[in-house]
Image (tube, rainbow, N blue to C red):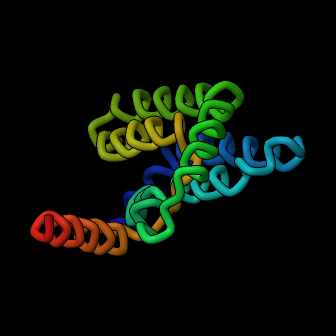
Amino acid sequence: MRTVLNILNFVLGGFFTTLAWLLATLVSIVLIFTLPLTRSCWEITRLSLLPFGNEAVHVDELYPEKRNVLLSGGGTLLNIFWFIFFGWWLCLSHIIAGIAQCISIIGIPVGIANFKIAAIALWPVGRRVVSVELAKQVREANASRQRENGRIR
């Protein structure tokens, strides 16, 4: 089913949103001061191409033992920079594609996936694209860790 939905996404506008992400990735490579954004661009490019079966998870969720206040602050600054230069038009492209896809009944699931990516497009720094199964495992592990920490206190 994921394959069918990913093909449907590609045909109904996912190709153009993926091209927009590739353009943002190339611009972030060419402009030297935007190199820290390149990894996030590439991660979300993958998500834009194959939204079904993949999910964007924040690095702090993937690796809770590596949380760092300094890196978190730097990521926030990069996200603000991202929003000004790239985020708003990539978000807008996903919203337009999502609306166009939701016009037809068959495109509604793909349109909803584009709306989810539009929210990620605003603040992508620190996100990694992983399989849905891995994202579920990570969230369950974090929830059980939080429960254990709650019992200790």
Residue in the image at 40% along x and 35% along y: 101
Above-or-below relation of 48 to 140 = above
Residue found at x 63% / y 45% = 74
Q: Nearer the viewer, residue 103 or 96?
A: 96
Asked where in the image residue 99 lies, by quadrant, the reply is top left
* Side (left or right) of 8 relative to 136: right
Q: Going by the image, does 26 lie left or right of 126?
A: right
User: Residue 92 is drawn in which quadrant?
Assistant: top right
Count of numbered labels shown in the rendering: 0
Residue 34 seen in the current view? yes
Q: Is residue 80 above or below residue 36?
A: above
Where does the image place residue 43, in percent across and percent down from the top left? 60, 58
Q: Name the residue: 73% across, 52% down.
A: 38
Residue 29 location (% of width, % of height): 84, 50
**The N terminus lies in quadrant:** bottom left
Task: Find residue 59 and report its horizontal and vertical position in percent.
Answer: 49, 61
Considering only vertical position in the picture, is 143 above or below 91? Answer: below
